[in-house]
Image (spheres, rainbow, N blue to C red):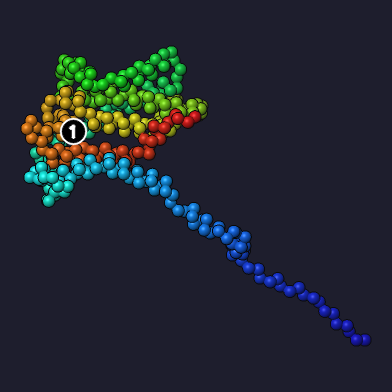
Amino acid sequence: MARQSRTVDVPAPPAASPPAAPARRAAARAESPPGADRNRRVRFRVRPRTIVIASTAWLVAAVFLLPYLQMVITALRPASELRDATYLPHDFAWSNFVDVWRESTLGDNLRVTLLVAAGSTLLVLLVALPAAYYTARMTFRGRKVFLLLVLVTQMFQPTSLLVGLYREFYQLQMLNSLWTLILCNAAFNLAFAIWILTAYIGSIPVELEEAAMIDGLGRVRALLKVTLPLALPGVVTAVIFTFIAAWNEFVMGLTLSTVPENQPLTVGINNFIGNYTVQWNYLFAGSIVAIVPVVVLFAVIERHVVSGLTAGSVK
């Protein structure tokens, strides 16, 4: 009997499909309107309004920077070319920055200014932080009156109190003392520090401190470990403004310090202005020495200053 052969149909392997990503891109290009690519390119063009705003900003910046440029150029002029009507000196006298240290007490004045600014800032923080924390967290009778009195003290000008301050420190035999300048600078900058720190600490939720105290921390440790790190931008703002105000102070340093070695840097620079002549090259060289540390300090912590000034604006 003959055997019947059986055939089995084997399915053919599926055809290789094209890559998905190129196919999608091709389909997207096919479905996009003809002017889509041109619109994408137009989107990155600079608008005339942007050009006008940028040009205005650069012009304003140049206007503010030109006096500093003139200060640098004058500081590099030789004494024989100070009266020449030229934009640049023929010879740059780099030795002016060396001679200004040798022929004056500028080094001692810089040391005094650093000590006074740092001491005033530290004293302001030691007093303003507890006062601002208590004012922001506690509700007590006369709270608004206290804040109003703090604000009123900020309105007093140091020049209006110079006679009384001089008489007081003269009787205490504290003239020509660093502590005198530290106390005066701290007193006149304390009000601003209390206000800025009160606003910033008040914007921090009190529930964070309550949770920390439930976990076993006391109020002081909760302040140091929870509130103070969160209030760091406000603290930095108070620090930079107090430091700059003490660094640039002139009237109290001139009145309460009569010994050249104990005078701050602003008064030491003013000593280059004589009765009949002005040493412009040394005056501007000393001014550059005075402004560089503050500019560097402000550039380093500028982002913290902006954050601290906007504290409490949004709830």
Q: Nearer the viewer, residue 168 or 251?
A: 251
Decide: is 301 above or below 37: above
Residue placed at 77% from the left, 75% from the top? 10
Residue placed at 18% from the left, 45% from the top? 73
Badge 1 density bin: few <14, some 14–19, many ≥20, Cα 10 Å: many
In the shown orientation, is residue 111 left or right of residue 59? left
Q: Amino acid at mark 1?
A: Leu
> Percent position (x, y) of residue 49?
42, 46
Quarter of the picture containing the N terminus is bottom right
Residue 172 seen anywhere in this rendered image of the structure: no
SS at circle 1:
helix
Which quadrant of the figure has residue 181?
A: top left
Residue 102 seen anywhere in this rendered image of the structure: yes
> Percent position (x, y) of residue 200?
42, 29
Q: Which residue is mark 1?
A: 265
Residue closest to the far top: 141
Residue closest to the far right: 1
